[in-house]
Amino acid sequence: MKPTRARAAARPPKRGKRAENKEKTRRAILQAALDLFAQKGFYHTTTKAISRKARIAEGTLFNYFETKEDLALYFFEQELAGIVDWYQHDKRAQRAHLPEKLFGIIHHLLERLGPYEEFIGAVYLRALQPSSKLSPLSLSSQEQNLRYLRFVRGVLAEAAAAGEIPETGDFGAYAFGLFHLAVITYWLQDRSAGKEQTLALLDRCLKLATTLLKKGGWEW
Amino acid sequence: MVGKPPQPGVLARGLRLGKLGLTLTGSYLGYQAQNLFLGESEQRQRRFEQASSQRVRQELGSLKGAAMKLGQLLSLQTAALPEAAIQELAGLQMQAPGMHPTLARAQFKASLGKPPEEVFRHFEEEPFAAASLGQVHRAVTRNGEKVAVKIQYPAIRTAIENDLKLLRSATFGARLSGHLPQAILDEVQRGFLEETDYLHEARNLEFFAQGLAAFKYVSVPKVHWDLTTERVLTMSFIEGEVAGAFLERKPAAAVRNLLGERLVELFYYQIHKLRALQVDHHPGNYLFQTDGRVGLVDFGCVKKITFDIAVIIRGCVARSWRQGDQQARQVLGLIFGPRVPYARARKMLATLEVMAGVLFPEGTGGAAVVDFGKGEALELLGRAMKKAVRDKVTNPEFAFISRAEMGLYSLLHRLGAKVDVTAAWRRVEQAGQSGALDHTV
């Protein structure tokens, strides 16, 4: 019995280690790809170059990411997780009023996406096709979407508890999610200096929305 | 032919502009309307209050008053514009939407490439004052110098451009009828757009710092060029209080009069010697100290003067129009511009006479002191402008100068200052060509 239990106890870390290594490689590939995208552009980056930079065989690359879409999916997953992480560690953001908080969340994402604009623009178009893994309706992207939406729902619930807005539940989170997509679209085509048009759009929309909610605009 | 008939394209253009307005960032008037609807200024005021400085609240209060006055003034000058549009356009001098710290930081970074905390030793995230089209934050540079950092609300220039396009199509009729000369709109547009460029303002600051160097009682902020862009202006911090806060300390009449005299002197010096004038005379532009020092901090809107205004002022002091037709022609020609026929301009003589009577009183024996506390000058100027619009004698050159004059009198009124305007003018007039005043108050 004893040795079995010991084996059982030893097994998970072993499996965890493998998973960890796998994750490490995934990240290395993504980082290599992103660096190259930023350097040479999305379209001029070959899988060969990515694998060389990530120091893996080109064949191995496909074990991790079948297509560039998978790479993008993983990228967004990382970025969305990054926002949640940032929010949980940023006391300032947590203290702010709702419009500022939501502004902070989207702006933080845009800042992270900033260096990879071309890449995002390219995958964004594909994401609009229903057959794409990246489509908001696709099952592959559901998981990460839901994780993010749950986070947003939590933020909105906090604001509701503080009396800033009425309860909005899932619907509020979905609405924000859609808004988020719209803002990224706007941001991608914003050619103003420092993308200040996007800043203004974000600010005005969020203030308008929260105020409407506050004033009971929710009723209609 | 009496002017061109309205073109069929006007409607289409209007529709296109309407579409522009659909993007939420498209219209400054849209912001303002939204603000009205949201009651943002109230919210903002509360935020400022919470942020501790009662001073700022007072300043905002006074700004609102000034904005209203300005609105009145502009609508006087351009009687045919929809009142609301004018009020909003005028109000934009002072009221951009408020920025929360996250947006202010984002805009700073968008313009300078780095967030404030990487550039400054210390940066206060709550603004201490509202500024034209943005807000001002206190900060300390890496070298330990206290500075004021003005940050502009994002994309405001595009918004104003769109509004002006809209305004042009909305005022087509008024322009045809001659109530609103095209030149006035051009002038307004030039001024507003210049104001959105902080690099331009920074150059103005340097120009005035140099030009007013002879006045030991004046402080003009020094520009930190390395931390200045079109949207962010970093300048040395000037001590002093805005009129509201300053007056709350109940400064002695002597101090108020001294400040009044200095303001008048500065006004005349700018239009006569520098031939350039800080025209946005809202109370936040002046910082007062109890020892009579004056800080001039906002040079967003500067008007270069292309003609010799001294002739007009001299004419008013001496009532030259009474001396004969030729003198009257000369003064009226300068005031109302070459496009207004003498016969029409002549109708303004009575008004001019009254104005001169208030500002440069005659037969007082010694000092010709004007008591601005009575508000007579302000009221008269307003009435004179109204008449000018009614009689279609508005002069585009004066669009901004009279705005400044109005602002000046309203400030003097708040100070309750008694000023010998004639003497102040003489001092400026007699100042050496070098620009230095030998004898300043």
Image (tube, rainbow, N blue to C red):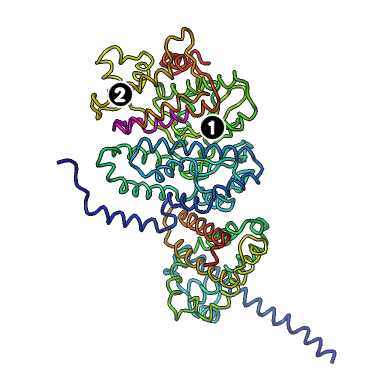
> For the residue marked with disc 2, what is the amino acid?
Leu
Measured along the vertical axis of the image, is residue A99 above or below residue B175?
Answer: below
Label of residue B221 in the image: 1
Q: Which residue is mark 2?
A: B334
Q: Amino acid under label 1? A: Pro
Tell me the quarter of the picture where residue A142 sits. bottom right
- For the image, the number of numbered tags is 2
Indicate yes or no whether the magenta region holds residue B395: yes
Q: Quadrant of residue B147?
A: top right
Residue B223 coordinates in the image, percent (x, y): 52, 35
Q: Secondary structure at mark 1?
A: loop
Question: Residues at marks 1 and 2, common chain?
Answer: yes
Residue A1 position, x and y percent, is 84, 92
The subunit carrying tag 2 is B
Camera-nearest residue between B82 and A52: B82
Name the main secondary structure of what is drawn in magenta. helix
One can see residue B123 in this view: no
Segment tinted magenta in the rendering: B387-408
- Where on the picture, by quarter, is residue A103? bottom right
Determine whether the residue tagged by mark 2 lies in a helix, strand or loop: helix
Pick the residue in front: B341 or B142.
B341
Judge whether residue B171 can be spotted in this image.
yes
Residue at coordinates 47% horizontally, 66% vertically from top-left? A182
Q: Residues within 10 Å of mark 2 (few under 14, many from 20)?
A: some
Q: Which mark is residue A201?
A: none
In terms of sequence position, does the residue under pointer 1 or pointer 2 come before the other? 1
User: Residue A61: percent from the left, percent from the top?
Assistant: 53, 78
Residue B439 is situated, as x and y percent measured from the top left of the image, at 50, 13
